[in-house]
Amino acid sequence: MLQVTVWNENRHEKTDAEVQEVYPHGIHGAIASFLEDQFQVRTATLDEPEHGLTQEVLEHTDVLIWWGHLAHHEVSDEIVARVKQRVLDGMGLIVLHSGHFSKLFKTLMGTSCDLKWREANEKERIWIVDPSHPIVEDIGEYIELEKEEMYGEHFDIPAPDQLIMVSWFEGGEVFRSGCTYQRGKGKIFYFRPGHETYPTYYHKDIQRVIKNAVQWAKPTALPKPIYGNAQPLEAIKTKQ
């Protein structure tokens, strides 16, 4: 069974009554609860020792899910480097919503990952622009969310390896909301929706996308590439 770690900074839930009402067990708890019927799931949060991401935890994680917002700056550079290396070695990574501005995502993308935003309780329609992709299996033409935070272009990310979803917002903006990347042996999926004051992670289609993404991002059973000076596989004839 695939081993999934759901990481959440877990700060809004401690200080904001509105967020506590929507996610009484934390955003990490809500996500873990709909994954548990299909995967072996653990959670980790910012204030745990080593942010809950010890070397042992990461070595037993096939796919890491990341949600952060208020406290990106509090995540240790040492832990970021540790997680990045695990991604390069083949661990899958799913970055949700405001995780776009995390140290981890920015270092893997190599850009600022900045964007426009607005909180106005507006409708979001997430259009599926690559219906052949396994991440959107069992999803229709679009996902509609009654209320969400707006993210707008320009989104300062590298061109995605695959662009799967594009959002339209009631105020007129559009946004690249479902993007995949490969870094080293690892697969990365960025998925936009999930503002902390909205019940987005209870939406069945959002849950389905995240479940599909875990399956897509799982490590491949390939040997680790060998780098450096290499001996020839065939005899090399000396040329006169």
Image: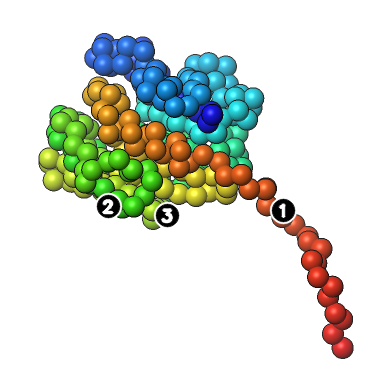
Q: Nearer the viewer, residue 238 or 79?
A: 238
Q: Which mark is in front, 2 or 1?
A: 2
Amino acid under disc 1: Ile
Q: Which mark is in front, 2 or 3?
A: 2
Secondary structure of residue under mark 1: loop
Kindly indicate whether the residue at mark 1 contacts the one at mark 2 (C-beta within 8 angstroms). Answer: no
How far from the left and from the top, in percent, is residue 115? 30, 43
Residue at image coords 32%, 11%: 24
CA distance for labels 2 and 3: 14 Å
Position of 226 relative to 78 (above/below):
below
In the picture of the structure, the residue carrying the numbered disc 1 is 226
Q: Nearer the viewer, residue 29 or 17?
A: 29
Relative placement, left or right, of 44 versus 222 is left
In the picture of the structure, the residue carrying the numbered disc 3 is 161
Amino acid under disc 3: Asp
The answer to which of marks 2 and 1 sits earlier in the sequence is: 2
The answer to which of marks 2 and 3 sits earlier in the sequence is: 2
Q: Which mark is residue 87?
A: none
How far from the left and from the top, in percent, is residue 225? 68, 52
Amino acid under disc 2: Val
How far from the left and from the top, in percent, is residue 70? 37, 25
Residue 97 placement: quadrant: top left
How far from the left and from the top, in percent, is residue 69? 37, 28
Secondary structure of residue under mark 3: loop
Residue at image coords 30%, 51%: 131
Secondary structure of residue under mark 2: loop
In the picture of the structure, the residue carrying the numbered disc 2 is 129
Q: Residues within 10 Å of mark 3 (few under 14, many from 20)?
A: few
